[in-house]
Image: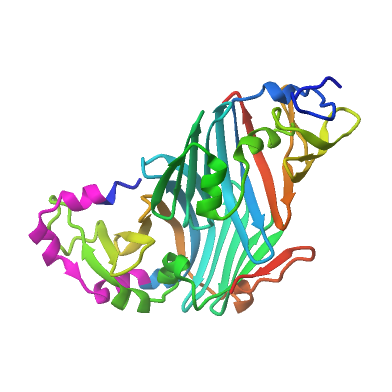
């Protein structure tokens, strides 16, 4: 699961970390397949003491640029949908949908990142590749581990991405609160022919609609 | 009905759920005002009176909030900071902007009035299940009751005060946690 990022960094001497600062170009090809794909996710939220406080799972569909579906199924349904202009957060239990504009969606940053919006990581982050002492050989693609530190963000502390054989495995988003959310990606397939309507949302009758702009 | 609360002006049915003080619920919390909406997943674990932990989080886990209470000691973690206070209500009002009487909600979520608060209005159905209640300025409605062992507990609770409206959907009750 998620080891504490601080522990990972402290286990490296400074020069080791310095020389494996990489630029976004190295990361883009690894993220690229995810940006147009479908799959399943497991999501776990830990508080600062590392206690698991929330666990959910569901399916996702990501279509660069900016289109995505993040459909939580377990333990209770909730849908997060974007067509690149509008983001809908629909909660069937609460019969409520919040509609936001895609443009100013800082708190959905992790999703924008994996929906192929790499403009975010080109300038906004310092990216370093974490090398466990054992496999110092950079070409080893058995497991690739990157840490992205935002240059300025008061809510986001780090985003960690792990890949295996160039295939994304997990993303861990650590907030300045110390809470961190681990997303694990499974059964990740290239996006076949999904109609664009997949990334639209028709508000069911009787739903309380709220425009959050 | 036998009167429970000292200051209760209306008779209150002595529902078994009064005795339940060790439970956990999981579900959703919706908060509405004229100008604001929030919806989050909710997990509330209660070990005894005034000792509980409440976790709220958005769909991607962002903006998580944690409240931990022991008798006379309340801690809130939200947006990067930790706050301590003896009065949960005042702290929540200052930090989250909503007056949330958590000390009452620990009873209301079970479908029973807060025992130490005057009851201004109350309505039961024929088998003694609470349908609606007014206390401390709040108007509450209870529905979707389900039976969990010997307890009959609500699955939906709406609570309103002036322009603030809360909807609590309880999808999962665990008793004697």
Work out whether A26 lies above or below B165: below
Q: Is residue A46 left or right of residue A101?
A: left
Residue at left offset 22%, top offset 47%: A7
Residue at left offset 70%, top offset 50%: B167
Of residues B152 and A79, the one drawn nearer to the viewer in this rendering: B152
Query: Can residue B177 be seen at all in this image of the molecule?
Result: yes
- For the N terminus of chain A, the quadrant is top left
Of residues A8 and B58, the one drawn nearer to the viewer in this rendering: B58
Question: What percent of the width, then of the height, locates residue A78?
Answer: 61, 57
- The tally of labels here is 0
Answer whether residue A14 is magenta in the image.
yes
In which image quadrant can residue A204 be found? bottom right
Answer whether residue A3 is magenta in the image.
no
Magenta stretch mostly in which secondary structure? helix
Question: What percent of the width, then of the height, locates residue A96?
Answer: 69, 60
In which image quadrant can residue A128 be found? bottom left
Question: What percent of the width, then of the height, locates residue B27?
Answer: 62, 45
Residue range (magenta): A6-31
In which image quadrant can residue A121 be found? bottom left
Residue at left offset 82%, top offset 25%: B13
Q: Is residue A101 left or right of residue B153?
A: left
Residue at left offset 53%, top offset 78%: A84
Residue at the extreme right of the image, as rendered: B126
Query: Can residue A93 be seen at all in this image of the molecule?
Result: no
Q: Is residue A27 left or right of residue A171?
A: left
Question: What percent of the width, then of the height, locates residue A77?
Answer: 63, 53
């Amino acid at each position: 699961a998620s080891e504490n990022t601080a522990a990972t960094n402290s286990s490296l001497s400074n020069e080791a970390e310095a020389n494996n600062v990489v630029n976004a170009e190295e990361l883009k090809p690894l993220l690229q397949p995810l940006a147009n794909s479908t799959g399943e996710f497991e999501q776990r939220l830990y508080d600062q003491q590392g206690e698991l406080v929330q666990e959910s799972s569901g399916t996702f569909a990501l279509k660069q640029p900016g289109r995505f579906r993040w459909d939580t199924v377990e333990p209770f349904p909730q849908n997060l949908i974007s067509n690149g202009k509008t983001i809908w957060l629909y909660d069937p239990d609460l019969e409520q949908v919040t509609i936001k504009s895609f443009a100013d969606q800082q708190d959905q940053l992790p999703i924008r990142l994996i929906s192929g919006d790499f403009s975010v990581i080109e300038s906004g982050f310092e990216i370093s590749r974490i090398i466990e002492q054992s496999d110092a050989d950079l070409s080893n693609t058995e497991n690739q581990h990157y840490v992205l530190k935002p240059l300025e963000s008061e809510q986001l502390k780090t985003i960690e991405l792990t890949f295996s054989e160039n295939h994304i495995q997990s993303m861990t988003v650590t907030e300045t609160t110390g809470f961190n959310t681990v997303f694990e990606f499974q059964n990740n397939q290239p996006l076949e022919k999904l109609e664009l309507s997949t990334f639209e949302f028709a508000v069911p009758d009787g739903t309380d609609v709220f425009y959050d702009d | 009905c036998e009167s429970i609360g000292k200051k209760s002006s209306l008779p209150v049915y002595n529902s078994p759920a009064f005795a339940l003080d060790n439970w956990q619920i999981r579900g959703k919390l919706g908060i509405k005002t004229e100008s604001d909406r929030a919806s989050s997943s909710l997990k509330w674990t209660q070990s005894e009176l005034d000792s509980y932990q409440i976790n709220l989080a958005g769909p991607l886990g962002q903006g998580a909030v944690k409240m931990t209470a022991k008798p006379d000691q309340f801690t809130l973690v939200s947006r990067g900071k930790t706050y301590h206070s003896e009065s949960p209500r005042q702290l929540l009002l200052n930090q989250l902007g909503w007056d949330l009487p958590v000390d009452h909600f620990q009873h209301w979520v079970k479908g029973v009035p807060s025992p130490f608060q005057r009851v201004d209005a109350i309505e039961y159905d024929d088998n003694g299940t609470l349908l609606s209640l007014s206390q401390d300025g709040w108007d509450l409605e209870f529905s979707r009751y389900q039976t969990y062992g010997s307890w009959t507990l609500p699955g939906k609770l709406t609570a309103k005060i002036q322009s603030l409206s809360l909807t609590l959907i309880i999808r999962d009750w665990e008793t004697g946690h």
